[in-house]
Every structure is written in structure tokens, then in C-alpha cells.
């Protein structure tokens, strides 16, 4: 079981950013409105994810650390959720199998919380503790018992970059949640969580870039398209700063990159890659989601329709504000 556990774990948590993604998604699933992520050395030595969500009931603690155990009830788009989020009920067990995990948690109805200690996938201690409502999970020494995996890890700086990119995506995808992200003691991000896309973007890109952003608010060919696109010197970057959230989830698509870049090229003489965050709502039947371990690649049934709708939305945004 231990060996199998470790192998399976390697597929779910292949690097610190992957573990953090799972932990933050759990916080969001638990209804958290504030989430703090703290790492040291790219997350290899230390990760802490803290939330003000529902907390975990005493009777569910053991189950939470078991493989294939999930408390989450099936929803309408469950098939879609499985396809995109994957690994139902495996994340916490997988992370715990390859690290030293401490969890403190308290539900709303309780006066005291619980502190759970876990090493190499086994709960070693549970005791009462004072803590605020919500859950804090600390992951130390990731892969300490998987020398092969540890050997594959990039330098901590590169792992920190991957975590930074993940936090950017999380923050932009949930403007209604206040995120705090701290790396090696330095606060990298602190978003207000006021529900406004603009303030989330300001947290990520800064106020100089925000002055050069145009609001996109349009619809067409079955898509609703909202968000911001940069048209100036301070609001351009590389393609990795073009973000697309399809039905709330970050997705990658060459069609979308092309649509935005072409629209911007037609109107303004700036570098190739405008910073953007576009929030697209589209019928589930119109998208085809392909799972990659890290990237989520999306395909559209009607590629031309999507391309044209996004391009004209961006063109309109630039035009309206110019006038
Ligand atoms: P899944 O999210 O697919 O259910 P996980 O392994 O990620 O599986 O988590 C296992 C269970 O632990 C969840 O179903 C949930 O009940 C509980 N859990 C994990 N993290 C949190 C959290 N931050 N807040 C509340 N419950 C949590
Ligand atoms: Mg989960």
C-alpha cells in the first residue's frame, strides 16, 4: 500500500504548485472567502494554506486523508468536473503520502478545533487546539520519502515561479475571494476579494498597467465575453499573461490567443502580446476539454464563431474607449 500510495501520489502532486492547486481548490470548495498561501523555497520545504471555510467535522477527519474518499456530492456537471479537476478524493491523501502534513481545523458549530499530525500518509496524532474557524494545512518536506521525485525537482526559484503563476490564475479567476500569497516571507499578492475583476487585475499587474486596460463587455455567437485587455506599454508581456477563464476555469487555447492578438494588432501599434484576462461564458456542449497533467487545453466546436466573437469584443472595447 505504501509504495502504491507513493506512486499514485506522484501523479497527483508532481510539484509544489500542483499540491497548492489542490489545497486551494479545497479551500474554495469549502466556501472560503479568504485564502492565505505561504511557501518557502518554492514550496519544497514548506507550504501553508489557510482558509476561513467550513472546516472539517471531527467525524470526517480520517476520511479526508483516505484515498478515493470525497465528501463532495455529485453536481449537475459532475462529469465535466471529473474531467477537468480529476483525481476526486485523492489530493489530500496523495500530498500526505509524500510529506509531513499538519492540519488544524474548526467548524462553525465548535468551540475548539482539532490538530491532526500526519507523516508519510499515516495520522500520528489528533488533539484539541484553539484555532479560528476554517482549515490550515501545513506541508513540510515535500517528497522527503520519495528520493527519485525529489531529484527531479527544479531549483526552488523555478518552483516558486510555478506557484506564482498558479496564484495569479487563482486570484484572477476568483475576484470575490481575498488571496494572500507570501513567498520566503515576502507578500507577493494581497487581493481585496471585493468581487471586481479590475481590482484583482490591479493586484496582479499594478496600477500603471491598469491605466492602459480597456474593459471588454460583449456577447456574440453564443459567448458572453467580459474582462480587460491591455493596449499600452505597461500592459503588454508575453503570451503567458493572456488569461482566459472559460466558465470560471482557466483554460488555454491558441484560438483565443490569436483572436486577442490580432484584434490588438489591428488597432494599436504595440508589442505582440497584450496582457489580458477574459472571462468567457459558453454552453458546456460547445466546449471540449482535454486533460493535461498541468495545462488545461480547450477546444471549441465552432472555432470560427469563437474566434470572431472574441476578436470583435476586443475591437469594440478598444473602439468604444477611443471615441
Ligand atoms: P476532494 O476535494 O476531491 O473531495 P481531497 O483529497 O482534495 O478530495 O479532500 C478530501 C476531503 O477533505 C474533501 O472532500 C473535504 O471533505 C475535506 N477537505 C479538504 N480540505 C478542506 C478544507 N480546506 N476545508 C474543508 N474541508 C476540506
Ligand atoms: Mg480536493
Image (cartoon, rainbow, N blue to C red):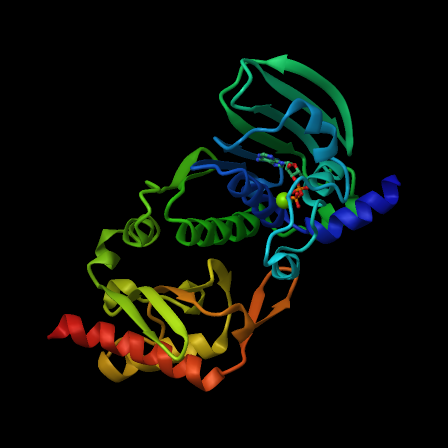
Picture quarter containing residue 217?
Answer: bottom left
Pick whichever, 281 or 255, lies toward us: 281
Pick whichever, 121 or 299, lies toward us: 299
Residue ranking furthest to the left? 323
Left or right of residue 319, residue 191 in this image: right
Q: How many marks?
A: 0
User: Does 231 appear above or below 117?
Assistant: below
| Residue 137, horizontal then vertical, whole percent | 59, 31
Q: Residue at x 36, y 66 (%)?
A: 237
| Residue 275, horizontal then vertical, whole percent | 34, 65
| Residue 71, horizontal then vertical, whole percent | 67, 39
Left or right of residue 322, residue 26 in this image: right
Q: Residue at x 52, y 18 (%)?
A: 131
Q: Residue at x 53, y 31 (%)?
A: 54
Q: Residue at x 68, y 14 (%)?
A: 127
Pick whichever, 301 or 161, lies toward us: 301
Pick whichever, 283 or 40, lies toward us: 283
User: Does 143 appear above or below 309?
Assistant: above
Classify the position of the N terminus by image quarter: top right
The quarter of the image that holds ligand 2 is top right
Classify the position of the C terminus by image quarter: bottom left
Picture quarter containing residue 214?
Answer: bottom left
| Residue 182, horizontal then vertical, whole percent | 45, 37
Amino acid at each position: 500500500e505504501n509504495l502504491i500510495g507513493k506512486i499514485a501520489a506522484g501523479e497527483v502532486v508532481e510539484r509544489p504548485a500542483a499540491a497548492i492547486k489542490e489545497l486551494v481548490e479545497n479551500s474554495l470548495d469549502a466556501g472560503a472567502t479568504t485564502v492565505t498561501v505561504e511557501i518557502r523555497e518554492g514550496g519544497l520545504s514548506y507550504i501553508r494554506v489557510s482558509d476561513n471555510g467550513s472546516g472539517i467535522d471531527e467525524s470526517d477527519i480520517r476520511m479526508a486523508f483516505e484515498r478515493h474518499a470525497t465528501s463532495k456530492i455529485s453536481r449537475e456537471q459532475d462529469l465535466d468536473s471529473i474531467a477537468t479537476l480529476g483525481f476526486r478524493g485523492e489530493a489530500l491523501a496523495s500530498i500526505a503520502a509524500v510529506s509531513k502534513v499538519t492540519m488544524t481545523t474548526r467548524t462553525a458549530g465548535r468551540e475548539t478545533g482539532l490538530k491532526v499530525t500526519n507523516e508519510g500518509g499515516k495520522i500520528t496524532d489528533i488533539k484539541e487546539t484553539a484555532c479560528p474557524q476554517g482549515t490550515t494545512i501545513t506541508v513540510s518536506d515535500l517528497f522527503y520519502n520519495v528520493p527519485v521525485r525529489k531529484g527531479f525537482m527544479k531549483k526552488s526559484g523555478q518552483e516558486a515561479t510555478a506557484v506564482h503563476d498558479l496564484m495569479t490564475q487563482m486570484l484572477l479567476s476568483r475576484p470575490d475571494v481575498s488571496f494572500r500569497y507570501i513567498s520566503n516571507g515576502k507578500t507577493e499578492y494581497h487581493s481585496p476579494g471585493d468581487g471586481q475583476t479590475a481590482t484583482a487585475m490591479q493586484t496582479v499587474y499594478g496600477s500603471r498597467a491598469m491605466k492602459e486596460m480597456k474593459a471588454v463587455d460583449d456577447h456574440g455567437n453564443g459567448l458572453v465575453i467580459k474582462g480587460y485587455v491591455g493596449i499600452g506599454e505597461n500592459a503588454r508581456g508575453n503570451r503567458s499573461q493572456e488569461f482566459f477563464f472559460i466558465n470560471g476555469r482557466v483554460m488555454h487555447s491558441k484560438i483565443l490567443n490569436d483572436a486577442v492578438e490580432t484584434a490588438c494588432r489591428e488597432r494599436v501599434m504595440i508589442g505582440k502580446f497584450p496582457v489580458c484576462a477574459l472571462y468567457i461564458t459558453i454552453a458546456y456542449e460547445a466546449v471540449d476539454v482535454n486533460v493535461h497533467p498541468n495545462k488545461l487545453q480547450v477546444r471549441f466546436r465552432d472555432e470560427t464563431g469563437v474566434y470572431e466573437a472574441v476578436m470583435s469584443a476586443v475591437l469594440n472595447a478598444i473602439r468604444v474607449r477611443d471615441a
